[in-house]
């Protein structure tokens, strides 16, 4: 049972309105790790900038980063700001070493009625992050359950710490995943495993199982995870940004269209990049055997 695996806080997380927020990491840790700190002040997340990467840390430690509506609103706001910042080329989303996100906030939603959830499009604003043009890397330590697993799957790349756990236990609450679990998990791990995880609610994947299944790209020691994710983010951020964003768009398009339509879309984007200064610089640098200096134009 889920209760035997994790603390009751995962099943009954604190609501946003009653939460006394504390920092997941000490101030000295943040100062050591961050190149600079953003001016934005949030209640449920921390933000910082590391070279060309924006780092968002979910910060509801007493609730194991349960995803309340206000938290996701703050995540969306931070993502929008990073997406508009020409000095940022990628974003990393992480939690604490104990929990990336233990799920949606059950206390917040337990009294909702169908008409309200439908007419107010409950969870609809969670989908906003898929419109972000810049690549998003999930750095998952600890529990990524329910909405936490769905949040990770909304990202473009998932890195996991050695003790990460992925699962979709919503069936135990009398509901189903509502933010992409039934749609994205099957594409990552296949129909049989996705069915088993979602229908039983108790079959979880550890970090290495998630890696073998294709849900996770790489597994790192817990204390190296965020740094490795930021390192990859900076590699991406130093590429030509029009190319990076078009590549992300083309890959994501493959989830939604037929192969022939996807190939045509890929070819159009490929051809369009021959109208950029970065294509001239990139191919010129290759021919001249030197490093390219992209200007994102």
Image: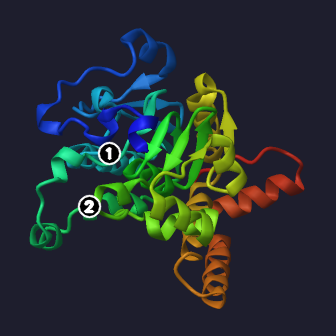
Task: State which tag comes first along the sequence, 2 or 1.
Answer: 1
| Residue 101 coordinates in the image, percent (x, y) | 40, 40
Q: Which residue is mark 2?
A: 123
Left or right: 72 with respect to 273?
A: left
| Residue 6 coordinates in the image, percent (x, y) | 42, 34
Q: Which residue is mark 1?
A: 75
Residue at image coords 59%, 32%? 163
Residue at image coords 46%, 44%? 144
The quadrant of the picture occupied by the N terminus is top left
Residue 275 has which mark?
none
Callout 2 touching callout 1 (CB < 8 Å)? no
Left or right: 35 with respect to 47?
A: right
Residue at image coords 47%, 70%? 183
| Residue 137 coordinates in the image, percent (x, y) | 54, 46
> In this picture, is 276 found above or below 15?
below
Query: Observer-nearest residue: 199 or 48?
Result: 199
Real-space CA distance between mark 2 and mark 1, rounded to the nearest whole angstrom: 13 Å
Instruction: Give the residue at the far bottom of this rendering.
Output: 260
Query: Observer-nearest residue: 108 or 52?
Result: 108
- Is residue 143 at all visible to an observer of this figure? yes
SS for dot 2: loop
> In this picture, is 200 found above or below 33?
below
| Residue 2 coordinates in the image, percent (x, y) | 42, 43
The quadrant of the picture occupied by the C terminus is bottom right
User: Is disc 2 surrounded by few (<14), some (14 to 19) or many (20+) residues within 10 Å?
Assistant: some
């Amino acid at each position: 049972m889920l209760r035997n695996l994790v603390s009751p806080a995962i099943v009954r997380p604190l609501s946003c309105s009653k939460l006394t927020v504390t920092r997941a990491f000490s101030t000295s840790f943040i100062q050591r790790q961050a190149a600079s700190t953003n001016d934005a002040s949030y209640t449920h997340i921390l933000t910082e900038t590391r070279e060309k990467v924006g780092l968002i840390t979910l910060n509801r430690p007493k609730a194991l980063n349960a995803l309340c509506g206000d938290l996701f609103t703050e995540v969306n706001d931070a993502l929008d700001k990073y997406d508009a910042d020409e000095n940022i080329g990628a974003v990393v989303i992480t939690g604490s070493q104990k929990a990336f996100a233990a799920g949606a906030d059950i206390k917040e939603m337990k009294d909702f009625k169908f008409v309200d959830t439908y007419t107010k499009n409950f969870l609809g604003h969670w989908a906003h992050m898929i419109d972000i043009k810049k690549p998003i890397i999930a750095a998952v330590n600890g529990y990524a359950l329910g909405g936490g697993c769905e949040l990770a799957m909304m990202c473009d790349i998932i890195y996991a710490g050695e003790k990460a756990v992925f699962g979709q236990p919503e069936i135990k609450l009398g509901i189903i995943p509502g933010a992409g679990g039934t749609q994205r998990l099957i594409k990552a791990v296949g129909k049989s495993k996705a069915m088993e995880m979602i229908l039983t609610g108790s079959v979880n994947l550890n970090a290495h199982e998630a890696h073998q299944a294709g849900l996770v790209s790489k597994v790192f020691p817990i204390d190296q995870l965020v740094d490795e994710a930021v390192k990859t983010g900076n590699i991406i951020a130093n590429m030509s940004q029009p190319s990076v964003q078009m590549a992300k768009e083309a890959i994501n398009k493959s989830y939604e269209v037929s192969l022939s339509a996807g190939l045509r879309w890929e070819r159009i984007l490929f051809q369009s990049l021959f109208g950029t200064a970065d294509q001239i610089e990139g191919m010129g640098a290759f021919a001249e055997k030197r490093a390219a200096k992209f200007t994102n134009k």
